């Protein structure tokens, strides 16, 4: 799915400080790859790219800890 790859690429290119590639099912928060500051950037990206409204806490509450789960959350709002 094109959207999932777009999200994965944004995270890899802009949010992860380590030189590491992620898969669609890589745990982002539990692994420490993304912190609370990066979460805000991710929310802004999602809102701009997919024209949906989302609160940063919704990602945590919905356990959207992978690109796949983030994509599912976006699909629910489209």
Image (cartoon, grey):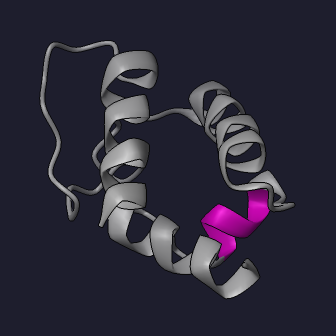
Is residue 31 magenta-colored?
Answer: no
Judging depth in this view, the residue of 62 and 48 nearest the camera is 48
Residue 48 x %, y %: 76, 40
Q: Quadrant of the N terminus?
A: bottom left
The residue at the point 64 percent across, 64 percent down is 59
Residue 17 visible to an observer of this rendering: yes
Residue 66 in view, yes or no = no
* Quadrant (top left/top right/bottom left/bottom right) for the C terminus: bottom right
Residue at the (13%, 24%) spot, across then down: 20
Q: Is residue 9 above or below residue 17?
A: below
- Residue furthest toward the front? 2
Which residue occupies 43% across, 58% down? 3
Residue 47 lies left or right of residue 24; in this view the side is: right
Asked which quadrant contains residue 44, the reply is: top right
Image coordinates of residue 38 in percent, x first then y, are 58, 28
Seen in the image, is 56 located left or right of residue 36? right
Query: Which portion, as a residue range, is magenta?
Result: 57-61
Which secondary structure is most common in the magenta stretch?
Answer: helix
The quarter of the picture where residue 11 lies is: top left
Q: In which quarter of the view is residue 30 placed?
A: bottom left
Left or right, 44 with respect to 11, comes to right
The magenta stretch spans residue 60: yes
Q: Is residue 46 above or below residue 70?
A: above
């Amino acid at each position: 799915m094109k959207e999932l790859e777009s999200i994965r690429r944004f995270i890899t290119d802009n949010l992860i400080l380590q030189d590491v590639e992620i898969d669609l099912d890589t745990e982002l928060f539990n692994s420490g790859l993304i912190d609370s500051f990066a979460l805000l950037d991710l929310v802004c990206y999602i809102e701009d790219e997919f024209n949906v409204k989302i609160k940063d806490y919704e990602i945590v509450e919905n356990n959207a800890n992978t690109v796949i789960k983030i994509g599912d959350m976006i699909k629910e709002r489209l």
